[in-house]
């Protein structure tokens, strides 16, 4: 399987129709909670906080959503916590993304599989970015890749996923498309979240950052980082139109990170239907459309059974991709 086909399949998934939603039921959460499986400032934290606020603003949950940051293992600590200790809880949802399906595909959550949780819904797709610090002498993606081709170990790129995770894979996709002969030599440094990676970039420990547009936006707005490329098929709209794509710089790399939620595997059907319907209602609202536009999220409208099938296919595709580049045996 080629990188291009995998990326195209991921982006094309936004065209899937949503599954029919179950009518209102008697379940209502007493204490809504969302686990962000990384520290503050990353993409999972963004997903929990933005969705939690929107659900409350739209009166889709009865009270404030408590957000708990539970970092470690590229999401593995949170996954194990939900599977082993909180499997029957109905008030709990957990932020997930392509990083989650990547780790599952690579058997990086020891003893845990895609079947052990219930997949709720997607809330959009977040395109990847490659960025540098504001004072970096590197001005374009081609300059970064040219230096990497000369000496792959001379460029340290940091991201908020583990080695072999989605942030790492995005860099390898771009490097391969740019002509780096052995992408396994690319120096990737893993952090517990995108915010920590940017902090190290600004401290001078890294030469570049890889992450998603939503987690990079705050650092762009503050002037701390400069985006070299967005890994989207074409330029995004609105305020994001200023950022060039890798493709327009001659590097045909696309990296779309889906964002969504899973729930404990033992969650009741009534609770599952409540959360699926609530997130679907949120997704269709003008409130969420505004959040998507302001944060560069692309459409990905999948709930319930369709989202479950999508995640399982993503796991299968990423496993094949990881074998292709030697990350997975």
Image: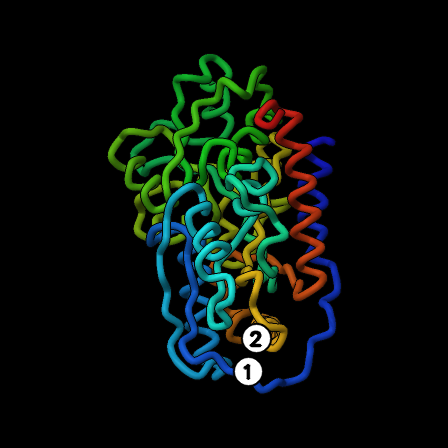
User: In the rendered view, does 315 fall on the left or right side of 112?
Assistant: right
Does label 2 or label 1 sit earlier along the sequence? 1
Disc 1 element: loop
Residue 193: give x, y in percent of width and height.
38, 45
Q: Residue furthest left?
A: 203
- Label 1 sits on residue: 27
Asked whether the residues under the numbered discs 2 and 1 touch, taking CB atoms below 8 Å apart as contact, a structural biologist would say yes
Q: Residues within 10 Å of mark 1 (few under 14, many from 20)?
A: some
* 17 horizontally vs 86: left or right: right
Viewer can see residue 244: no
- SS at circle 2: helix
- In the image, residue 49 sits, relative to residue 64, either above or below, namely above
Q: Kindly give the residue lying farthest to the top in the view shown.
A: 150
Q: How many marks?
A: 2
Residue pictured at 36% horizontal, 61% vertical? 68
| Dot label at residue 210 | none
Q: Position of residue 320 (x, y in %)?
A: 68, 33
Residue at left 59%, top 46%? Answer: 113
Q: Which quadrant of the structure image shows residue 198? A: top left
Residue at the location (60% across, 30% down)?
251
Crowd band around label 2 with a 10 angstrom C-alpha radius: few (<14), some (14–19), many (20+): many
Q: CA distance from mark 2 to mark 1?
A: 6 Å
Residue pictured at 53% horizontal, 70% vertical: 288
| 60 shown above or below 15 | below
Q: 287 and 318: which one is in front?
A: 318
Write down the residue under mark 2: 271
Residue 136 visible? The answer is yes
- Relative to 80, residue 150 above or below: above
Residue 283 pos. (x, y %): 58, 70
């Amino acid at each position: 399987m080629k990188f291009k086909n995998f990326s195209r399949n991921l982006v094309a998934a936004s065209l899937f129709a949503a599954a029919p939603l179950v009518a209102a039921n008697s379940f209502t959460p007493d204490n809504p909670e969302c686990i962000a499986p990384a520290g503050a400032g990353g993409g999972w934290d963004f997903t929990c906080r933005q969705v939690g606020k929107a659900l409350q603003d739209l009166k889709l949950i009865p009270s404030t959503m408590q957000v708990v940051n539970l970092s470690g293992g590229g999401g593995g600590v949170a996954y194990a916590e939900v599977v082993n200790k909180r499997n029957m809880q109905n008030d709990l949802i957990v932020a997930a993304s392509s990083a989650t399906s990547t780790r599952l595909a690579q058997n990086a959550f020891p003893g845990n599989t895609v079947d052990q949780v219930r997949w709720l819904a997607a809330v959009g797709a977040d395109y990847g970015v490659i960025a540098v610090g504001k004072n970096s002498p590197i001005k374009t993606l081609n300059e970064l890749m040219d230096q990497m081709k000369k000496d792959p170990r001379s460029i340290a790129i940091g991201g908020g996923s583990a080695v072999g995770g989605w942030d790492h894979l995005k860099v390898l996709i771009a490097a391969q498309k740019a002509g780096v002969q052995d992408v396994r030599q690319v120096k990737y440094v893993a952090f517990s979240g995108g915010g920590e990676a940017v902090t190290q970039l600004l401290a001078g420990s890294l030469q570049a950052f890889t992450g998603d547009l939503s987690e990079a936006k705050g650092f762009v707005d503050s002037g701390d980082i400069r985006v070299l490329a967005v890994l989207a098929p074409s330029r995004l709209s609105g305020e994001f139109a200023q950022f060039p794509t890798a493709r327009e710089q001659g590097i045909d790399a696309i990296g779309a990170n889906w964002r969504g939620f899973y729930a404990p595997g033992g969650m009741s059907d009534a609770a599952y239907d409540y959360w699926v319907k609530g997130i679907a209602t949120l997704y269709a609202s003008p409130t969420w459309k505004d959040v998507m536009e302001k944060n560069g999220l692309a459409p990905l409208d999948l709930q319930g059974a369709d989202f479950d099938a999508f995640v399982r296919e993503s796991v299968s595709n990423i496993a094949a991709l990881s074998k292709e580049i030697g990350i997975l045996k």
